[in-house]
Image (cartoon, rainbow, N blue to C red):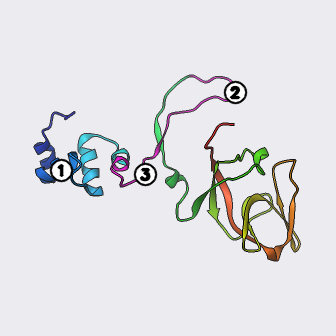
């Protein structure tokens, strides 16, 4: 053990029975989330990483610092964690995998994950999830004009789609993007 504790001493320190902790260590038993938090505190580990490895919580991404996309910056590693679930409430947001190239001029590429805030209304200029006639869904920029709705692609080779407002249902607004491949 890193702290020089025996398994028996660690078990006593965190309030677990020695045989239970031994079984957890050997993969023969599972630890509760509370037990994993106590163990991580006792061992000086990041509880989120330990919980993620044990399958109790998703492991947050490590944000290693800043990188210049213009003039170079001093190379410094400043590690923090980034949990998508903390940045976007999973009760109000969902992910959609983008299929196609209709939004490429806004940097939304085929295969990317669009972070969508659930919504039934949107403002002009917002990128929305629109369902046409209750059957076909698309990700486009919204423009409302009177009783008409335009769904505008961000690809010069494609045409704007226009419908009576009664045929279009807004299901969400794109609020972020997870790039899955480099293009």
Residue 144, image x, y percentages? 84, 67
Query: What's the residue at 24%, 41% (across, down)?
Result: 43
Q: Circles 2 and 1: CB distance less than 8 Å? A: no
Residue at numbered disc 2: 70
Q: How many labels, in total?
A: 3
For marks 2 and 1, give the CA distance.
52 Å
Query: What's the residue at 34%, 47% (across, down)?
Result: 47
For marks 2 and 3, give the CA distance.
33 Å
Residue 8, image x, y percentages? 10, 44
The 10 Å Cα crowd at callout 3, few under 14, some 14 to 19, many 20 or more, is some
The 10 Å Cα crowd at callout 2, few under 14, some 14 to 19, many 20 or more, is few
Q: Is residue 167 left or right of residue 182?
A: right
Residue at numbered disc 1: 23
Q: Is residue 119 above or below residue 125?
A: below
Q: Is residue 6 left or right of residue 65?
A: left
Residue at numbered disc 3: 58
Q: Is residue 89 above or below residue 156?
A: below
Q: Earlier in the sequence, mark 3 or mark 1?
A: 1
For marks 3 and 1, give the CA distance.
23 Å
């Amino acid at each position: 053990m890193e702290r020089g504790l025996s398994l028996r001493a660690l078990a006593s320190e965190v309030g677990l029975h020695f045989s239970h902790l031994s079984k957890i260590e050997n993969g023969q038993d599972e630890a509760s989330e509370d037990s994993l938090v106590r163990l991580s505190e006792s061992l000086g580990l990041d509880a989120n990483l330990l919980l993620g490895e044990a399958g109790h919580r998703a492991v947050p991404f490590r944000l290693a610092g800043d990188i210049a996309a213009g003039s170079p910056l001093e190379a410094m590693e400043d590690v923090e964690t980034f949990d998508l679930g903390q940045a976007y409430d999973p009760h109000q947001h969902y992910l959609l995998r983008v299929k196609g190239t209709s939004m490429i001029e806004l940097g939304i590429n085929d295969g990317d994950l669009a972070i969508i805030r659930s919504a039934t209304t949107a403002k002009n200029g917002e990128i929305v999830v629109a369902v046409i006639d209750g059957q076909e869904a698309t990700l486009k920029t919204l423009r409302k004009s009177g009783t008409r709705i335009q769904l505008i692609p961000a690809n010069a080779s494609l045409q704007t789609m226009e419908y009576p407002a009664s045929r279009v249902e807004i299901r969400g607004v794109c609020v972020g993007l997870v790039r899955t491949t480099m293009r």
